Image (tube, grey):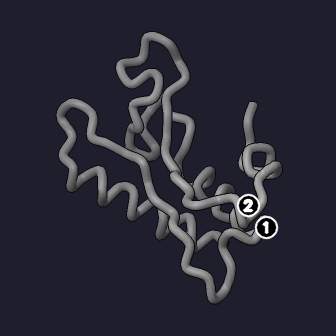
Amino acid sequence: EESPKKALGTLKKPNIAHIHIGNCVKRQGHPLYGDQHPRFGIPGGENDVPQVAEFLKELFEIGYLARGRRPVVAFEVKPAAGETSGAIIANAKRALVEAWARL
């Protein structure tokens, strides 16, 4: 099982150009299985607010996020069938605001 600490632990701040945060479904047979970038908190997904908060915390730990720095952190999400882009953007913003409040 991968964790933010494990994933980011080998990286060094000067080598990181930008960070993408997303979600995935690892269960085969699920309609959003694989690299589909579903919204945060989707049933069967791996990431929601607690995981985003943990990832952001680790970005602070390695120095990528720091007071006075404005690095690039982007969300990699896309609408599934029946979802709108606006709803997916609102979901990503909600996840960021709620995760940031936990830091």
Farthest residue, direction front:
15
User: Which amino acid, by three-letter code, is at mark 2?
Assistant: Glu
- In the rendered view, tell whether residue 53 sits above or below residue 36: below
Q: Quadrant of the C terminus?
A: bottom right
- In the rendered view, tell whether residue 68 sits above or below residue 63: below
Q: How many marks?
A: 2
Mark drawn on residue 21? none
User: Which amino acid, by three-letter code, is at mark 1?
Assistant: Glu
Question: Circle 1 — which element?
Answer: helix
Q: Are marks 2 and 1 in contact (CB under 8 Å)?
A: yes
- In the rendered view, tell whether residue 72 sits above or below residue 35: below
Q: Position of residue 85 (x, y in %)?
A: 21, 49
Please indicate whether residue 97 sits to the left or right of residue 103 in the image: left
Residue holding disc 2: 58
Going 73% across and 61% down the picture, which residue do you hit?
58
Residue in the foreground of this view, choosing between 45 and 64? 64
Q: Quadrant of the N terminus?
A: top right
Q: Residues within 10 Å of mark 1 (few under 14, many from 20)?
A: some
Q: Position of residue 15 (x, y in %)?
A: 70, 59
Q: Position of residue 99 (x, y in %)?
A: 56, 64
Going 46% across and 44% down the picture, which residue do you hit?
41
- In the rendered view, tell whether residue 26 sits above or below residue 76: above
Residue holding disc 1: 61
Going 55% across and 79% down the picture, which residue do you hit?
70
Q: Position of residue 25 (x, y in %)?
A: 49, 28
Please indicate whether residue 16 sits to the left or right of residue 91 in the image: right
Q: Residues within 10 Å of mark 2 (few under 14, many from 20)?
A: many
Going 47% across and 70% down the picture, which residue do you hit?
97
Question: Circle 2 — which element?
Answer: helix
Farthest residue, direction top:
29
Please indicate whether residue 82 sits to the left or right of residue 34 in the image: left
Alpha-carbon span between mark 2 and mark 1: 5 Å
